[in-house]
Image: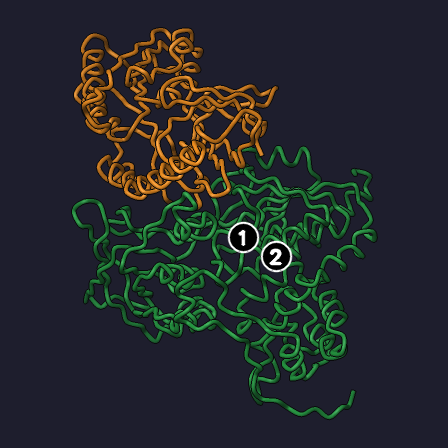
Chain colours: A green, B orange
């Protein structure tokens, strides 16, 4: 392969809808590549050998990135073939590429390590992945691949229950179904998808795309029971009587609140409530959809992760002035770079080094303003490598009718309260195979991590599926099937 | 999808639905609720299973027509139709202990939530008196409660057509408070329990407090998911923030921050009215269309 390559330093950009237009609707912001643009970007890839490729090492699910990118170039004269070949490479590691192509923090993972970064722009891996998934879906190529795959699956005759239809649970379900297990997902909400449905807004991840990814799992034979709350409708003990193994992918369902006076005033939402109303219940279409949401003229979002960006950008689409208030500095913002840029383009302002100390009411139970203490950073760093911060004793008040708290979540208490399940600081404890303290019960995603990203949860789902497969293989061999 | 096996209007603005929901019927205990999403564009609303059959897999919901979603349910759903989602059971079951002499109060359709709990308390050996205060045409479950508990008292208020609905409701509150005072003066109770609008719960609590009787209140704050995920239903109890869906719905009335709860319950009233008005307009249009 000693072909001499011409190095193209600049990334092929993906078209985006202009900011002034997109703040008026929930339609997707990024428009994605066409085949021609995707091939142009794919050609920039240096094709590092598999064993070396640093992008693969940076990917929590280890997708063969040069492998799928090369297919686009190799079959450039036959777009359908190119996409089919590329998708079959991706699918060996990732069943939800339309989702991860949109929501992964690529700059901290695959793209962070890209060798092209030493001489120019890194390869736009996320958008290429998204292109493959979108093109395949639009042309029915994913269905075709699935159709070829299904008859080759050898049924194992063992049953696995999955708790939660979010990224971890869906991934584990997909992998286990491909291995021939009989998989049933128990989902508390009325729709599968977890955070992909209730948390991430339509303008970043259209719900029709999540639905189509879930449909593929159903075609693989995965059963999904919505409206079933594990811990109430059915317990883990009961699941163990019926299933050979259980995977907990229940996420970080409980919002963290701020311990400050006035936290229960009207107008103060947790990001979970706000985003659930807007995304899952479509409150932006009220009164055509029955669920209301109130977004004041001035909105303060507290926190600076992806959830905070999602909440802020959603609030902006109601015509409000939005400020993101964060107790640390810009270097500690944990949201994806693309989301922060999009937020700024959409006119959202940032206030750094401010920590909320009081929510001030209007005397009728409604929020009027938020009082913050100004903070300053020290040189000392905490365990996560972030600079420690201290209060300055100076205060600033921001007027707002709506405050959205986006400072993180704890795992759902209904699951954590299972007898015999070892839990530390609200998180389920697992061994190196993701098995919990209950034999046959595995866990992954935010239920064990606290709060992380979609792709880390999917990585856990994949790893757990592998561990469950080994566990059940042993069980079969011992004659317990 | 959950099939409606029976549907009937059992009193003014009170509709009875017998629904196939085996996953709930199998597990539900008195004091628990379900979240119902009846239509694709409908809200998720908390409702209480009033009766159930574990073997046959059905539950009974009695729904008070209050806003757009419940009005649509009453108008649009027919027996044989399906309710899109019924999630549950949710919330903690009511404490089943021998408390002694209990006064269990239901205002308006709140009595339907009192019913399974009061029945179970009576079966456990408590001496249960139930009190139902509502408008005259809205009495429900009278015979069932008379059979289930030691004594069932119904207090009704006529609807004065010259007054608006909020003023009429004030008359119910007045009668409710008078009746509770009268009952507590006459006999001593070991526990008072109440379900009903938050304002009425607070009014009753003010009376009960004077007599120093322990009181539990079954709360109905605004909810979205019902599983502890959103925090919409948060309520301050004993100075701590609790989620009614997973910590409740039942709390010690002496510990509840009532005024905060009342303010939170009314946050969407204006939007609910708007949704209802638009819905009424649609119905009027449909009726006019039908007359042509």
Residue A325, visible in the rendered structure: no
Residue at figure coordinates x 56%, y 29% from the top left:
B81
Rendering coords of residue B100 (x, y %): 34, 12
Which element carries disc 1, helix, strand or loop? helix
Determine the image quadrant of residue B48: top left
**Residue at mark 1: chain:** A
Q: Which mark is residue A448?
A: 1
The residue to which callout 2 is attached is A460
Rendering coords of residue A275 (x, y %): 42, 53
Residue at figure coordinates x 21%, y 54% from the top left:
A368
Residue A91, visible in the rendered structure: yes
Q: Nearer the viewer, residue B55 or B159?
A: B159
Q: Earlier in the sequence, mark 2 or mark 1?
A: 1
Q: Quadrant of the N terminus of chain A?
A: bottom right
Which element carries disc 2, helix, strand or loop? helix
Indicate left or right for B39 with A321 as reference.
Answer: right
Residue at figure coordinates x 55%, y 59% from the top left:
A454
Q: Nearer the viewer, residue B90 or B264?
A: B264
Q: Is residue B65 above or below residue B44?
A: above
Indicate left or right for A330 with A480 as reference.
Answer: left
**Residue at mark 2: chain:** A
């Amino acid at each position: 392969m000693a072909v001499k390559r011409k190095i193209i330093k600049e990334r092929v950009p993906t078209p985006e809808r202009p900011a002034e237009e997109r703040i008026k609707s929930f339609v997707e912001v990024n428009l994605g590549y066409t085949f021609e643009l995707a091939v142009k970007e794919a050609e920039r890839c240096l094709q590092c050998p598999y064993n070396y490729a640093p992008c693969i090492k940076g990917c929590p699910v280890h997708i063969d990135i040069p492998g799928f990118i090369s297919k686009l170039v190799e079959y450039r004269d036959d777009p359908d073939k190119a996409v089919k070949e590329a998708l079959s490479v991706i699918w060996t590691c990732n069943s939800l590429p339309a989702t991860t192509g949109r929501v992964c923090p690529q700059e901290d993972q695959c793209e962070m390590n890209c060798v092209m970064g030493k001489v120019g722009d890194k390869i736009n891996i996320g958008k290429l992945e998204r292109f493959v998934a979108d093109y395949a879906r639009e042309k029915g190529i994913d269905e075709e691949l699935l159709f070829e795959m299904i008859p080759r699956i050898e049924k194992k005759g063992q049953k696995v229950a999955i708790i939660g239809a979010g990224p971890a649970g869906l991934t584990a379900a997909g992998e286990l179904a491909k291995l021939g297990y009989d998989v049933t997902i128990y989902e508390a909400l009325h729709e599968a998808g977890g955070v992909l449905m209730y948390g991430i807004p339509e303008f970043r991840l259209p719900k029709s795309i999540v639905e189509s990814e879930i449909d593929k799992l159903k075609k693989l034979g995965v059963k999904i029971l919505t409206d079933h709350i594990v811990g109430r409708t059915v317990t883990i003990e009961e699941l163990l009587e019926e299933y050979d193994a259980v995977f907990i992918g229940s996420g970080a369902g409980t919002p963290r609140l701020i311990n400050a006076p006035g936290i229960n005033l009207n107008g103060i939402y947790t990001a979970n409530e706000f985003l659930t109303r807007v995304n899952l219940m479509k409150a932006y279409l009220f009164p055509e959809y029955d669920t209301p949401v109130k977004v004041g003229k001035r909105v303060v979002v507290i926190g600076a992760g992806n959830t905070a960006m999602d909440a802020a950008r959603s609030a902006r689409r109601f015509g409000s002035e939005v400020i993101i208030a964060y107790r640390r500095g810009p270097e500690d913002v944990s949201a994806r770079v693309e989301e922060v840029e999009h937020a700024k383009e959409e006119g959202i302002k940032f206030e750094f080094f401010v920590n909320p100390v009081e929510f001030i009411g209007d005397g009728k139970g409604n929020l009027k303003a938020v009082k913050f203490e100004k903070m300053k950073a020290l040189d000392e760093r905490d365990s996560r490598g972030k600079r420690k911060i201290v209060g300055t004793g100076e205060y600033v008040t921001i007027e707002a009718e709506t405050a959205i708290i986006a400072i993180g979540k704890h795992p759902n208490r209904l699951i954590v309260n299972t007898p015999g399940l070892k839990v530390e600081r609200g998180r389920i404890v697992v061994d190196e195979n993701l098995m919990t303290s209950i034999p046959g019960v595995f866990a992954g995603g935010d239920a064990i991590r606290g709060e992380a990203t979609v792709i880390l949860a999917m990585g856990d789902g994949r790893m757990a599926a592998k561990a469950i497969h080994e566990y059940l293989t042993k069980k079969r061999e011992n004659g317990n099937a | 999808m959950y099939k409606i096996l029976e549907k009937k209007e059992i009193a003014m603005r009170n509709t009875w639905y017998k629904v196939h929901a085996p996953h709930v019927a199998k597990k539900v205990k008195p004091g628990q609720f379900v979240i119902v999403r009846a239509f694709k564009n409908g809200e998720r609303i908390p409702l209480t299973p009033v009766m159930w059959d574990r073997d046959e897999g059905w539950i009974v919901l009695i729904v008070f027509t209050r806003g757009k979603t419940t009005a649509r349910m009453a108008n649009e759903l027919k027996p044989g139709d399906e309710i899109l989602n019924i999630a549950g059971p949710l919330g903690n079951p009511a404490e089943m202990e021998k408390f002694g002499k209990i006064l269990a109060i239901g205002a308006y359709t709140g009595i339907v939530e009192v019913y399974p709990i009061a029945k179970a308390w009576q079966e456990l050996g408590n001496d249960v008196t139930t009190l139902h205060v509502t408008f005259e045409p809205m009495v429900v479950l009278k015979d069932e409660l008379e059979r289930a508990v030691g004594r069932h008292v119904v207090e009704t208020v006529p609807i004065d057509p010259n007054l608006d609905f909020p003023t009429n409701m004030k008359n119910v509150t007045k009668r409710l408070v008078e009746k509770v005072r009268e009952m507590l003066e006459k006999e001593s109770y070991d526990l008072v329990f109440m379900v009903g609008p938050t304002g009425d719960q607070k009014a009753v609590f003010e009376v009960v407090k004077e007599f120093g009787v322990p009181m539990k209140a079954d709360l109905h704050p605004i909810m979205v998911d019902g599983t502890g995920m959103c925090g919409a239903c948060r309520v301050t109890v004993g100075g701590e923030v609790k989620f009614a869906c997973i910590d409740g719905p039942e709390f010690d009335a002496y510990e509840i921050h009532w005024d905060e709860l009342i303010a939170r319950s009314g946050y969407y009233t204006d939007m609910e009215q708007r949704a209802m008005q638009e819905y009424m307009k649609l119905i009027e249009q449909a009726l006019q269309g039908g007359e042509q």
